[in-house]
Amino acid sequence: MGEFGIGQSVKRVEDQRLLRGEGRFHNDVNLPGQVHAIIVRSVHAHARLRSVDTAAARAAPGVVAVFTGADVARDGLGTMQMTLKRKRPDGAPMWAPPHRGLCQDRARYVGDPVAMVVAETPAQAEDAALLLAIDYEALPSVTSTAEAVGGAPVWDECPDNVSNLFEAGDRGAADAAFARAAHVVHRRYTITRVHAQYMEPRGALGVWDPGEARYTLYADVQYPHRVRNALAGNIFKIPEHGIRVIAGDVGGGFGTKGWQYPEHRLVLWAARKLRRPVKWACERREAIPADEHARDNVTDAELALDAEGRFLGLRVKTLANVGAYVSSDRNLLATFSNVATLVGVYAIPAAHVAVTSVLTNTNSTAPYRGAGRPEATYVIERLIDDAARELGRDPVELRRTNLIPPSAMPYKSPLGVTYDCGDFPKNMEDALKVADVAGFAVRQEQSRRRGALRGIAVVNAIERAAGASPEFAEIRFSPGGSATILMGTKNQGQNHETTFKQILNERLGLDPKDVRYIDGDTDRVAFGMGTMGSRSTVIGGTALWTAADKVIAKGKKIAARLLEAAEGDIVFSEGRFAVAGTDRAVTLREVARAAFQPAQLPPGVEPGLYETGTFAPKQDTWPNGCHVAEVEIDPDTGVVTLASYVIVDDVGTVINPVTLKGQMHGGVAQGVGQALMEQVVYDRESGQLLTSSFMEYAMPRADTLCDMHIESNPVPTKLNPLGAKGAGEAGTVGALPVVINAVMNALAPLGVRDFDMPATGDRVWQAIRDARRTS
Ligand code: MCN
């Protein structure tokens, strides 16, 4: 409806404030009397802490306190509790050790928090931190995913480093499919470890209010309510109302800022002990050692095909590196989501998947943009390209033969999930046209004349988004008739304010200027699950729609009285309640004002106008799309240049085409970054982190990317009244496989058979050289 409604390219209302530097990020919050904390982190991948001598640090200028693991243990701080009940392959319960906040007897990765120094200024805390005398006894370590099983034990209690095994599908059916296959294609793919690299490094400000006997945490978290619940229930063991969590503007989260980190409990705990606000602001150079990382798995995948190229079965075994600690259930979610979409958009009748989560001397791995879906899509889409090469078939034709047709919807996949709707063949056919795949040979020849190799790839992506869990919204009118919306989701850059105001405009006709937007405060917002898994638009948006429905229902009663008509004759549209078939009408604003004047109300109607909506979908949505990329490679340097990128995407009803494109661009950039250059690297022998800053960790820049052409092929879902599917991760899900497949398409004619990300110049050059030597 109108210029602000659903489907309109409304400019982001939040940008004025953010671009003028008027946002309020965690580091903008400063309180009287605050002191500053520095976390002293392990310099060893694995070490016994023989002693931590704090005397010199305590005596340093400005130091207020120095805390170690012994203090945490003495005060009885709790740990996160897992609710997932998984098992190890031997049937024993999974070994998924939580973090204690500060290391107890051992440090288990480079960056593991060993001590906290609190001083009047950050500089004094840093100087004092250098005076800590930590006597480490270095122990053998293992950081590599492939070498974790049978490597040096990270925990004595779990000598083989196997945390748990997760299986899906039907092993018998898959084995039977392989037994009758005409062809079997087998490959091993490695997906690297990366860091989310949000623009705003993490931070936390802890406050203790002795009068109210209550904590307040200011932090850049994605799920304020769940962080509060975890801190209250698991760590401090107090009722939830004993903690308030406030997340202001958040400069990117991408999944790995999800919820509670050790620093959150430490600043709160120290604030109470010291009776002063305690602030920790992660330095950029501290971020890679301090934060949870992502991805990092090794997969053996097999595809069975019949003589006509129809897919018969898929078998996948993945080793997923979970790091040294498992800080919550969500750290294992990536392995779960990974499994669900491994068959992609293809009619593969039988599949079996086994994911073994392994412990290593590395940071925990958390869900990161896509959380398992880019990994799954990478495996199936690479396997199809490799199968096409091995069987001498056209990769697009092979896909076309096996796509699930729209007539098969809802489609129950052999991995236990149901795709509700989508038109996968149309996505691909449209993308082939837009990307002019037919004209590739000409462009390849032009590249060849310039001395360059050119590769193309077409991949289909599907992902589980907006997983079934509740979300909350509230609409409050004031006596003057203006409105405030309070959302349980948490914006981190996804333009929630704009998006939700558009949804409200569509349903209630309210001008965005007349609506105030609030999120991220557990005292102001009654409930929330927060933002992750591309759920906010679908679930938060529907919660808001539900609350708006209640506003309309109550408004009709009030309007009937104001218009002296029967309630059944009142119709609501475009912000006005009218008597059907007449021009007699009152605006929503007038109705809202009347709601606060008891004399204006019909009997039995409660004064006031504030409604809540909580939506709990029955099922996940399945956004999908087709990505086509072309790369050019300089064979003399190995440098890969992205030449073109096309997406035809189905996220159901599009709320805002321009912000959706922004989400696609960002998502693709993160996938391209990982495919071409990003990687967290450890030294195999010492377990040292070799990429702890931007000096060693390469990030994509504007010139890494090319123009992106994005089109929509929306198939609205019936799972929510908006018809929307999640969109925030879709770009990344397709980008990872399409870039590497395009690189492989360019390299395979030279004899390169196996190639893993990242496609950096030196690695590509090496692959070309090795292939030339062999041939
Ligand atoms: N949208 C739309 N139509 C749809 C769905 C979405 O127009 N059918 C647009 C809307 O503008 C909406 C945005 O896309 O605000 C994202 O919507 P949604 O898919 O609901 O995703 P969430 O808001 O729940 O965001 C989470 C998602 C995830 S899981 C990661 S990771 C990620 C991402 O969003 N992290 C981000 N995008 C990010 N963008 C920024 N700037 N910062 C992050 O940390």
Image (cartoon, rainbow, N blue to C red):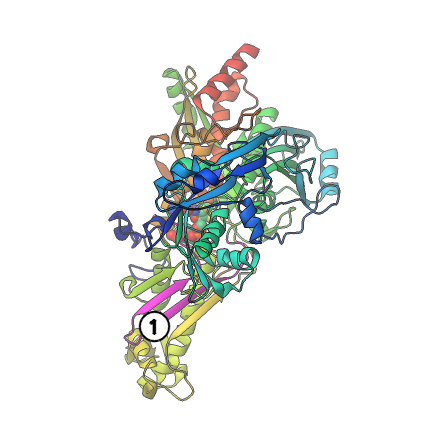
Task: Tell me: residue 763, above or below residue 307.
Answer: above
Q: Horizontal placement of 194 versus 276: left or right?
A: right
- Where does the image place residue 493, in percent across and percent down from the top left? 37, 49
Q: Is mark 1 on a helix, strand or loop?
A: strand
Residue plotted at (39% across, 31% down) = 694
Amino acid type of the residue that numbered disc 1 sits on in the rendered structure: Phe
Instruction: Work out which quarter of the rendered image holds the N terminus and state it.
Output: bottom left
Q: Quadrant of residue 761?
A: top left
- Where does the image place residue 112, in percent across and percent down from the top left? 52, 39
Q: In which quarter of the image is residue 595?
A: bottom left
User: Is residue 484 within the magenta segment?
Assistant: yes
Q: Horizontal placement of 101 versus 6: left or right?
A: right
Other-residue count near label 1 (Cα within 10 Å), few / some / many at <14 / 14–19 / ≥20 = many
Residue extent of the magenta highlight: 466-492
Instruction: Work out which quarter of the rendered image holds the C terminus and state it.
Output: top right
Q: Which residue has dot 1 on it?
A: 477
User: Is residue 485 within the magenta segment?
Assistant: yes
